[in-house]
Amino acid sequence: MSARIIDGKAAAADVRARVEEVAADFTRKVGRQPGLATVLVGEDPASAVYVRSKGKATAEAAMASFAHKLPDTTSEDELLDLVDQLNRDDAVDGILVQLPLPRQIDSSRVIAAIDPAKDVDGFHPMNAGRLATGLDALVPCTPYGCLYLLKQELGSLAGTEAVVIGRSNIVGKPMALLLIGESATVTVAHSRTRDLPDVVRRADIVVAAVGRAEMVKGDWIKPGAVVIDVGINRVPVEDGKSRLVGDVDFARASERAAAITPVPGGVGPMTIAMLLRNTIVAAHRRAGLPDPEGL
Ligand code: NAP
């Protein structure tokens, strides 16, 4: 058997096209574009690339992009002042503070300072709590993108056995909550889990969010399972170059899975699409409009 490859780029393009339509409609109704503010502190090259691509995608979706770049010597108070200013700026519907932050800044204090209504990363404790209690929330973009792909692949997830590997606040935990919300039976595995291969073998749905190159082996995958690989790991190849691989041994797992996301081109593109989706949803809620349909 050879797995169907889940095309995250195509799914992300669909979401982005819908966001663009909805953004144009919002601008007509409200008299201003929906706006996303990004905040980059310091010079981390990977963070700079992420922030640039988020800004570009925002503009491409007919939304306003406000980019703030601060030096890596920025103090926590200076960053909190900027967050406060963005919270009060009516043109800003979403605030994204790129993580990680420099050592002198406590990221949990910064996240907690963001207006939950503008928290398009979905990391504020208020949004985490709303997700956990089944209320409307702004949901972290990566797990929300994974859920979109799973529902596209499987339709209803009710009654499926899902195993999420990883329990971070950014991916694993919200992923588990989203799957519970879809009536899957969910196991969350982590570094202290005993017999991980056996746990994974019972899963109809595997979501791997670990950060260890090809840790999940092909023979852990139940035949016919759907595999979502969140991991992004750079591994060296001969000639001094490197390539990106996921947390799953893609070649072997593809021999058993019904469907699997590739790395790159699977979950990655969905993350930005869902950031745009969260921004347009936040804009509607702030303007007192009903949530846009089809997103
Ligand atoms: P993280 O905060 O480092 O969490 C990793 C999780 O994996 C932890 O819960 C850890 O368990 C668990 N773990 C570590 N070693 C394990 C092992 N041997 N067996 C089982 N579980 C193990 O990472 P993250 O932020 O969730 O990100 C995970 C991966 O997804 C990374 O590769 C990251 O680059 C990628 N990512 C991709 C996107 C995207 O857009 N595609 C977005 C976010 C993250 P403990 O809790 O016990 O330590």
Image: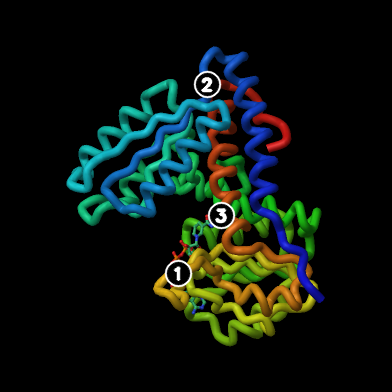
Task: Tell me the element at label 3.
Answer: helix
Mark nearer the N terminus (1 vs 2): 2
Q: Is residue 167 visible?
A: no
Disc 1 or disc 2, which is closer to the eye? 1
- Tell whether label 2 touches label 1 (CB within 8 Å): no
Residue 32 falls left or right of residue 17: left
The mark lying in front, picked from 1 and 3, is: 1
- Residue 268's disc is 3
Quarter of the image that includes the N terminus? bottom right
**Residue at the image position 57 percent from the left and 15 percent from the top:** 30
Local SS, label 2: loop
Q: Which quarter of the image is occupied by the C terminus?
A: top right
Q: Residue under label 2, please give it.
A: 33
Question: Badge 3: how crowded within 10 Å, few (<14), some, or many (20+)?
Answer: many
Quadrant in which residue 182 is drawn: bottom right
- Residue 34 placed where, x, y %? 52, 25
Numbered mark located on residue 242 in the image: 1
Earlier sequence position, callout 3 versus callout 2: 2
Q: Residue sitting at 60 percent across and 65 percent down?
A: 229
Q: Residue type at mark 2?
A: Gln
**Mark 2 residue crowding within 10 angstroms, few (<14) / some (14–19) / many (20+):** many
